[in-house]
Amino acid sequence: MRAEFKVGKLDMLRMHIDVIREAFKQVIVPDRITVEYPRERKKYPANFRGLIFCDRDKCISCFRCAHVCPANAIQIYFYEKAWPGIDYTKCIFCHFCVDSCPTGALRPTKIHDMAFATMEEMKLKATQTIKPPEVFREDLLVVEYQVDEKGWKLVRKKERDELIVEVLPPRIRRKISTCVDPESCLGCKLCVELCPSNAIAVDRKVNKLKILSEKCTGCGICVRNCPMKVLELKEVK
């Protein structure tokens, strides 16, 4: 048994008119939620977690970004100093490294649409993280979702969203390493070997540490690794 449904000519004409009316409506006042990327780009907030780059002039080689990274995606490379490189095959874009950087050397961006030819290219060395990559943009409109008591709507603006975020620099209080208990020092020279700024030496005459305050960046590596815990970071007033 087969049921058949017949549509009258009047009903067919009405359906065609409804379709044409909806097409004209979408042309004049569109209510679609689709973003026509790459001609349009969705506006992201300033705290969007995208690609990260490093300002070498601010980096004090404290290794904190590498220690805090939960995905083990940051590797420290040694050139003139120690600087971070980022492995984007591991990075989960949590931005713990950005948040924990004491000098604001790690900078966030809104760049998320990256393309790499191979997996090896995703492992950026310190020489590749010093500036944002070149971005090829086709977008002419910024799309933003606006929600109010009447509902939501998609607003298109003829402008470009800045992908490099300008953030306020953190308040930096300069600290230097200080030996607070010289009598307990073993003279193991571990701090001398680990210091990335060559700010620690050993005075052989008295067999005591000599910390050069003008070179010390306050990275805290010596403090964290001292086996006797005789080193502390003291704020410089």
Image (cartoon, grey):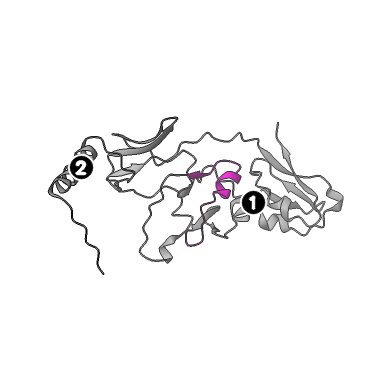
Measured as percent of width and height from the top left, residue 25 is found at 22, 37
Q: Which mark is residue 198?
A: 1
Foreground: 172 or 193?
172
Quarter residue 215 falls in: top right
Query: Image check: 222 left or right of 116?
Result: right
Q: Secondary structure at mark 1?
A: loop
Q: Secondary structure at mark 2?
A: helix
Measured as percent of width and height from the top left, residue 136 is found at 30, 48
- Check if residue 148 falls in the magenta segment: no
Magenta region: 88-108
Q: Quadrant of the C terminus?
A: top right
Q: Amino acid at mark 2?
A: Asp
Sequence-wise, the earlier of marks 2 and 1 is: 2
Q: Residue furthest right?
A: 183
Q: Dot 1: few (<14), some (14–19), or many (≥20) neighbours within 10 Å?
A: some
Q: Amino acid at mark 1?
A: Asn
Kindly report the secondary structure that dominates the magenta region of the rendered protein. Answer: loop
Q: Residue furthest left?
A: 9
What residue sits right under mark 2 in the picture?
18
Measured as percent of width and height from the top left, residue 85 is found at 50, 56
Residue 220 against residue 158 in the figure, above or below: below
Which residue is drawn at the image coordinates 50% and 56% (left, top)?
A: 86
